[in-house]
Amino acid sequence: MNTGAVAGQLGSFLADLRFLACFGALGLYGAWISVQRPGMVGMARLGLVVAFGATVIAYALSGVPPGTLPFTDFFLFVLLTMFLILEFMFQMSVLGVLVSGIGTLVAGLHYVWHPGATTFKAPNLAVAYWWLLRDLAVTTGVAALTLGLGTALVLFYMQGRRTGKLVHPNDLRDMVALLARGATPCFFFGWLFEVAALVQAGHATWGELWTVSWLTLMLAAAIAWLVQAERRRFSGRRVLGLIVGSGVALLAYSSERLLFSNLTGGPHFP
């Protein structure tokens, strides 16, 4: 029996399962918004739990170290983990469409996006270590900020109105504040780890300066969002501007990370 072929088939099966689970959850959450039957929410949650399990099992069976884990896989793992925990704590079903939609998009990349191995290598093991910590922290921050901005957008639309039995504005406000408190330290430590990598490298390339600039921008956006979230006010042009600006920054960062197959690495200008 060809072990490699079996592992490849199992990996493809888990990728298909993750995509179908997220896609099914997207349809169920969308239907729940229309009819608001609690049974649909339960099935949608089960779909995301299946997608989470498929992601974890696929990584466990791959046997690869964390540094070789694709950015998209780790991002989806963190996003699903955060949402499922907060969903059972605060009943944030209204965010299910956002999370399952992102999950469907990320899982669908398996069929259209197959990046090659990154060629940007660390100059030494110490720099590689700091890069790994940086990317783990920043990717976690990206997932937290994505959930926080999605929640704030719902609050901006609701304007304090309660739209169903499982949705309450006060719970949404608490969730935004909680996510903002988590995202800001992630970006701060990511920035700190990048500075440590620069110190260990002994010199800064254009690519590393580019990364520091991006992390500084993301940290500033996270701090601004934390200040706004603590005020518990999500109306007006200022809030909408923060949501749009931070969302554009997240999309730009995520698009850049898709150019690399692993968590560690960054833009390289020879």
Image: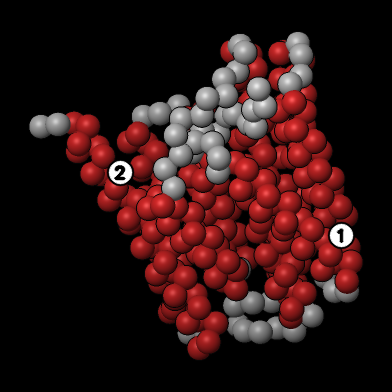
Which amino acid lies under the numbered mark 1 shown in the image of this protein? Gln
Q: Nearer the viewer, residue 188 or 198?
A: 198
- Whether residue 232 is visible: no
Residue occupying image coordinates x 32% and y 50%: 14
> Alpha-carbon distance for marks 2 and 1?
42 Å
Residue where numbered disc 2 is placed: 11
Residue where numbered disc 1 is placed: 228
Residue occupying image coordinates x 22% and y 32%: 4
Please provide percent x and percent y for residue 57: 36, 43
Please provide percent x and percent y for residue 169: 73, 75
Q: Are marks 2 and 1 in contact (CB under 8 Å)?
A: no
Which amino acid lies under the numbered mark 2 shown in the image of this protein? Gly
Extreme residue toward the left, this view: 1
Report crowding for label 1: few under 14, some 14 to 19, many 20 or more residues within 10 A (C-alpha). some
Please provide percent x and percent y for residue 10: 25, 44
Residue occupying image coordinates x 66% and y 84%: 163
Compared to residue 191, the image places residue 17 above or below, namely below
Quadrant position of the C terminus in the picture: top right
Compared to residue 219, the image places residue 193 above or below, namely above
Quadrant position of the N terminus in the picture: top left
Q: Left or right: 145 with respect to 31?
A: right
Counting residues from the N terminus, which is met first, the one under dot 2 or under dot 1? 2
- Whether residue 163 is visible: yes
Residue 269 location, quadrant: top right
Compared to residue 80, the image places residue 150 above or below, namely below
Q: Which-is-in-front pick, marks 2 and 1? A: 2
